[in-house]
Image (cartoon, rainbow, N blue to C red):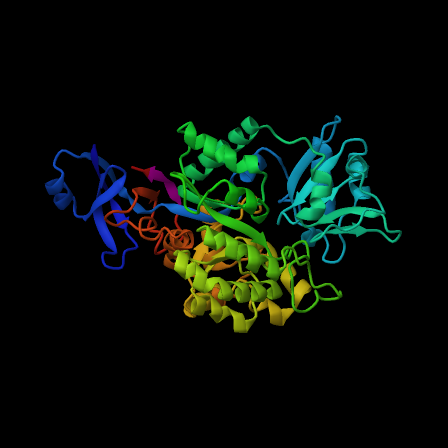
Amino acid sequence: MEQIVLAGVITLNPLQPRAEAVLVSNRRVRFVGSREDCLAIAPKAEILDFREAFLTPGLTDAHIHLTGYGFSLAALDLSACQTLEQGLAQIAARAGGTTWLQGGGMFPNRWSETAYPTATDLDRVAPNQPVFIRSRDGHSAWVNSKALELANVHAQTPDPEGGRIIRDANGNPSGMLLEPSAMNLVRRVIPAPSLEDCVIAAKRACLQLEAWGYTSVHTMALEPADFLRAVQELEQRHELPLQVWGSVPHADLEHVEASGLRGGTGDLVKLCGIKFFADGALGSRTAWMFEPYLGTSETGVVADPPELILERGRRALEMGFTPVVHAIGDRANHEVLNVLEQLKPLAEARGVRLRLEHAQHLQPSDIARFGQLGIVASVQAIHLVDDAVPVFGLLGQTRAKTTYPFRTLLETGATLALGSDASVASPEPKLGFEAAVKRLGLDRKPFMPEQCLTPLEALEGYTIGAAKAAGWESWYGQVKQGYKADFTLWESDPSLELAKPIKALRV
């Protein structure tokens, strides 16, 4: 069956920017042009008439935690809480019983720029029930005394490698755990969800993303193995509505190697990335910086050292996988760029395009290196909404000027791939596009407005840029002959204004 889609087609193909019809055959674009030309080629094709709408290549979220986002949709969410007391009130409303109370969305810097919340705070509203609340950035957790007791975390428990237990004046754990290695001290005693629970969560996430117009995601590895397995299970059940670029933690590299897997394998779910974490996050004050956070002697946390990323990144490339490296602080980005520069010859030999995740805080001398080295900057504009106000108190005016430098990255030759980092932030397209185009903080004031993107540039980041980050630019991210027929329909022209997607359209 061949189909002709009629709409205001925005192809993002510079050789044919606009069209009025797309002829699709066997899930691929056969022809792009006028309605008459499409009918001349396929006179018996089914007509799909969307002439009141605009059609673009399908949206891709280039950085998401897919199954985790699905779980977050049904979990306690503190992201709207402006104060500690508001957060505690929400927790109190859900507290009760003896099973673990879990949630996320906590943003410590919004509540205090200098102090973390404590187990004692949580004990006031949930004294007998173990509580585990993730921060919005996913790099810290707030737990109560019952949780610490069940996990046997006490004054003599050492800080794990790459993590930190915040302690009170007497050396006792205060209730905040920084970075996944410290969070896992408690998380390891929380009963794991079943595979079927994970499948349900993954499907919940996929259906929401599809409704918002997404046709593809790049899902990142800060999740248990069953989270990715659940997405693969949806594909096997023919219930997966998305194209998925997947990654696994570098800790699983030996298992992947022993299994004989190679990068890029799979149909709808392609296993492509090996994930590393160079540092933490700004909100948890664990992003690795050259200079200390204002008023402190702290420069953040080194999670995976550069030497480890280089050695294991080389092994990943030899198997055809992309080293996917999280870097937020300016020191982390500098060190990761050094590593990727060393890996570039091998990446080119293996046909792998290098990418760097987040690239939030950069030294001026490092910005141009993305373009010079051909490294995709996988960025999440929506994070600046939360960071725009506290960043000045954490880093100061000078360092804040090169925070989320999207315009400068583009002008120096970088490719931007846009995403959300959900469940850290919402993947709703209108929020991500507004953050990229208007750069408004929570106070609704513009944050470094000279770094704003145009609507067209933002659209390209969610389509062409994301396809390049995945190494899919020869068959995804444009409306073009031979490309996959994954589209997004819009109420108005998203290349000219902030527009609302109607739905995903996979023909």
Q: Which residue shows up at 54% across the image and 36% down it? A: 227
Q: Indicate the quadrant where residue 469 lies.
A: bottom left
Total marks shown come to: 0
User: Which residue is outermost to the right?
Assistant: 170
Q: Which residue shows up at 75% across the image and 58% down it? A: 114
Which percent across, then down, holds residue 420?
51, 49
Image quadrant containing the C terminus: top left
Residue 503 among those drawn in magenta: yes
Q: Is residue 40 above or below residue 372?
A: above
Residue bounds of the magenta highlight: 500-505
Which percent across, then down, holds residue 161?
71, 52
Which percent across, then down, holds residue 194?
59, 28
Q: Is residue 321 above or below residue 52?
A: below
- 109 or 63, nearer to the observer: 63
Q: Which residue shows up at 66% across the image and 43% down it? A: 134
Q: Is residue 419 above or below residue 377?
A: above
Left or right placement of residue 372 versus residue 363 in this view: left
By secondary structure, the bulk of the magenta-drawn segment is best described as strand
Left or right placement of residue 115 versus residue 198 in this view: right
Q: Is residue 252 visible in the rendered structure shown here? A: yes
Left or right placement of residue 501 versus residue 428 in this view: left
Image quadrant containing the N terminus: top left
Left or right placement of residue 221 versus residue 282 in this view: left
Q: Is residue 381 visible in the rendered structure shown here? A: no
Q: Indicate the quadrant where residue 240 lies.
A: top left
User: Which residue is outermost to the bottom?
Assistant: 365
User: Which residue is outermost to the left?
Assistant: 40
Which percent across, then down, holds residue 105?
63, 44
Residue 204 among those drawn in magenta: no
